[in-house]
Image: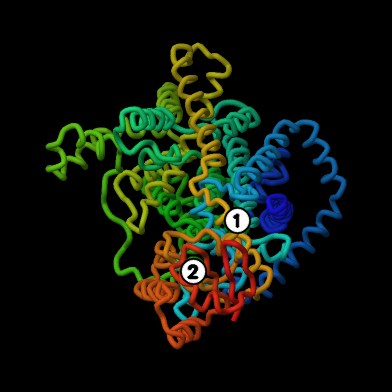
Amino acid sequence: MDTFVQLLGLLTAVLIFPLVIWVPGWLLAKSCNVLDFDQLPLTSRLALPLLLSMALSPVLVYLAARYLGSQGVWAIYSLIWVLATLTLLRQWRDFADGIQVLWKDHWRGAIILLAWIVGCSLAVIDLILPDDIWRNLNIMDSVAHVAFTDSITRTGVPPANPFTYPGEPIRLFYYYYWYLICSLVDQVGGAWIPARAAVQAGSIYVGLAIAALIVVFTNLLQGRTWFPGGARQNAKFGWILLAVTGLDLIPWTFLHLIHRFFHLGPGGGVSLEHWNEQVTAWMGAVVMSPHHPAALVMGFTAILLLVRLCDGGLTGWRWWMNVALIGLAMSSAAGVSLYVTMALGLGLGIWAAWMLRDAAQRRSLLGLVVAGALALVLYAPFALELRSSSKLESLPLQLSVRAFEVTDYWLPSIVKVLKQWSASRYLLRLLFLPLNYFLEFGYFAAAALLYWVWRRKLTPKLDSVEKLLISIAVSSFTVCTFLSSTFKWNDLGWRAFLVAQFVLLLWAIPVTNWIWTRTPETKKWRSALLFLLITGIAGTTVEMINFRLRNIDQVGPQGVATYEAYRWVDKNTTAETIVAFNPNSTIDYFNSLYGNRQTVSAGRLYGTHFAVGEMGVKTLEDCLQFFSGKLTEAQRNAFLENYKVGVIVVVPADPIWADKESWIWRQKPDYANAGARVFRR
């Protein structure tokens, strides 16, 4: 029954999301004819509003929430909805005709999108069994994303850090723009849509937005000599390529086999991405860390608008509007994922330097400079907020060479002398970069090579849009190869590659078209390309099966008991309640996902993570002492008063549980089951 309730909440969120991230974009595109909206084919007229809403809403909602409060946000959205309704009523016949044409001519695409919604919904929910909870591989990331969304709903903007409460709220240090949008859906849905359902629905729409980006890009690039084929055919191949990853399946399987049968090496990990430094598959990126692909959508929406500037023909207020939209989109992207935006921003800088001698594009360069200045101005309040929230003492970036499992583990294990020569690791990484990237990109690497072999035969001259795509791809490769982030994980090296991945996908579309049409040019390459393509699709398939079926946290009956306790907390306490539980674990998976409350300390990782500094460590230690059972009554009361605790949750793993003379057995709980006791103050 609980699984059905989860699914119902998720599907309700899916239905509400368009009010937040489609309707505003449709109203803007319709009223201002953005990207010649009225002349676009039907599929692009459906896709573009999603892209515009996703690109513009985060920064505008943040600024409205920051300076006008939540009432100001809802006043703006109410006005948008009223204007959109009036516009729709005036053009109802055109809208109805469009629905009819969509189902008649594009029903296959509609079924694919519906299948994505249903399949993703079934993949991300928990399966609540009588004696276990079956989660997915995304559970660790979900804890953070859900907690951030819930904190925004409870505490507003700027939100409080939901994982640490040292006696008073502290600001969250995180790029939370995307989860601000998820929070709006959470607020609209009320009790029907918990924060987790809003986050899960958001990941579904990020996937739809990437599909929409392909539709609009293929339409905008149609007719250019270097991008042959019809827009509809190209979009179809682009969607197929979203199901393709690199050759990860081969080394992942090999590492599993030699570990299992010969007890060599660490194995391949539960995910295909764990065998090496990640270049994440499209579907995996969307369901595991949706805000990074969301930033990609925002950044490439800005690229779409910049391409329109490069094509010329915009004058007056339309030129200025395009420039403003570019600035808004880049500012939103920076507030969603600075890693993705860093690669895009550097690429735009490379392109600008490349185009300085092109007199025909100087007006476009001027527009880019103005848009960049606007993006920085709009981003400044958020940057200052993050600065005041951070306890970091140094820049969390370092120079490096991208890691490779072969050079970092296997070669030193075989050639022992390499362990004594530390510089050899970086030299070997450089030497093995081609193999590293071929395994990670697979079909896309081969397709890009073939594409440029064909492209050079046309003409050596590159147009401004080609230079733009090359610049941002080179930037992405450079950043991800020679820089790494040090803030717990190398998220920079994992996420900034999405920029290059999308450019490679665009270059792979013509190659895939050639394979499909069996042209003589690709005859000798067809077998190899098909092998890479099939392996890439198989890799994504295995990864999504792993995502749903490889439960790394089988919690058993105790997990169900803890789940029921936190569901009680969610239903029987106010949103302002502070919860205390034993943080003696790496991550707590229950309060954030099911309790939806601020916690004193959420565990050894998230409780001290997100740049909270020494106060996070002290809060963790105090909380551990409380659940040790060694405190006197006066000390316990002092802890509860200092940290303003409203609810205490105790489970059998806590040391205090084993002491049958402790206060948890003398005091009557407000809720209890075989594996949890809950006390409300």
Answer yes or no: do the residues labelled 1 and 2 have beta carbons within 8 Å? no
Percent of width and height locating residue 51? 62, 50
Q: Secondary structure at mark 2?
A: helix
Q: Which residue is mark 1?
A: 560
- Determine crowd level at label 2: few under 14, some 14-19, many 20+ residues with C-alpha closer than 10 A: many
Q: Look at label 2 and name its amino acid.
A: Trp
Judge whether residue 287 can be spotted in this image: yes
Q: Is residue 503 above or below residue 454?
A: below
Residue in front for this viewpoint, 167 or 563: 563
Residue in front for this viewpoint, 629 or 1: 629
Percent of width and height locating residue 72? 67, 74
- Determine crowd level at label 1: few under 14, some 14-19, many 20+ residues with C-alpha closer than 10 A: some
> Which mark is drawn over residue 657?
2
Rendered residue at 25%/36% (across/down)? 407
> Which mark is drawn over residue 6?
none
Q: Quadrant of the C terminus?
A: bottom right
Percent of width and height locating residue 58? 58, 61
Q: Secondary structure at mark 1?
A: helix
